[in-house]
Amino acid sequence: MNPVTEGLPDSFWGIPVPGPVALASGTCGFGLELDAMGLLADVALVFSKAVTPEPRDGNAPPRIHDTGYGLLNSIGLANPGLDRVLSEVLPAAAGLSRPLVLNVACESVSAFGSTVAALEAGGSHAGYEVNVSCPNVEAGGMAFGVDPAAVASVTRAVRRETRRPITVKLTPNGGDMVSAAKAAEDSGADAVTVCNTFLGMKLDWRTGRPALARGAGGYSSPALLPLVVARVWQVGRAVRIPVIASGGVWEPGDVLELLAAGASLVQVGTGLLRRPSLPSELAAGIRDLLCGT
């Protein structure tokens, strides 16, 4: 039985969805601008830019480099911070036409818990995406996501503060993603997001200087699709909770391939930055492909 041709998902976390395409964190703000342009009609869920306890200006420029076949970024979690999200963003997002999932990034386990506890006081957001790719100050800067025990600690800290659904966004940059996904599931996650950007770097061979001011950054590209498909396949066979695929999507067939690998939703990111109308283009293309099967 082909899980794709048997029918696309019409709900996720009990939320009715128009299709399997969602917006990846860091590529759509909080969805407000895209909604104002009428570009969310075919979007399942909007995953917000990261929310941190304090406002962040992000890393020094240049922090984006287009390689011609992919995008390097080192944005540095730029965002208005918890207080302004509560006082300004969430009231504005209350009228969003599609459900908003807040991506949360913190540097300690306790900060994850306290940040989500504060966010619980405001807004009608649908849930949380827990970013465990950020530096873990409690372990000297190592990302939480490379250590299943740390993933479990963060997930439990968030779970204690909310009854809303949680997905844990896993990193492909080190560690055992399958073990990390199982740790998230065992600690109360309702889904896992597979995955974040891959560590990459561009150097000018003449000067030896990196294209990004910070040096290395996160790489995203349609060429990464086979890597993401493999990880979704591996994780999907190890956990019982839904897998949200993220990475490498450019064409309608990419979405269907990730669903066939075991994903329940598919996020688009870099492609959205290039073509804000991409979700609707994918939805139309998916319908055409499935009608031909």
Image (tube, rainbow, N blue to C red):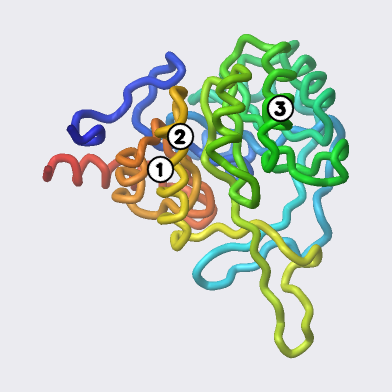
Q: Residue flagged by tag 1: what amino acid is it?
A: Pro
Numbered label attached to residue 279: 1
Q: Amino acid at mark 3?
A: Val
Q: Are marks 3 and 1 in contact (CB under 8 Å)?
A: no
Q: Is residue 31 visible?
A: no
Q: Nearer the viewer, residue 43 or 131?
A: 131
Residue at 55% across, 57% down: 220
The amino acid beneath tag 2 is: Leu
Dot 2 corresponds to which residue? 40
Residue furthest to the bottom in view is 206
Asked if the residue at tag 2 contacts the one at tag 1, i.e. Cβ–Cβ closer than 8 Å, the answer is: yes
Disc 1 versus disc 2: distance between alpha carbons?
8 Å
| Residue at screen point 73% across, 53% down | 75
Q: Earlier in the sequence, mark 3 or mark 1?
A: 3
Query: Considering only vertical position in the picture, is 97 above or below 207?
Result: above
The mark that comes first in sequence, 2 or 3, is: 2
Q: CA distance from mark 3 to mark 1?
A: 23 Å
Q: Given this view, does label 3 or label 1 mark the residue nearer the observer?
A: 1
Mark 2 and mark 3: Cα distance apart in space? 18 Å
For marks 1 and 2, the one nearer the N-term is 2
Which of the labelled discs sits on residue 89, or is there none? 3
**SS of the residue at dot 2?**
loop
Q: What mark, if any, has residue 61 been given in the picture?
A: none
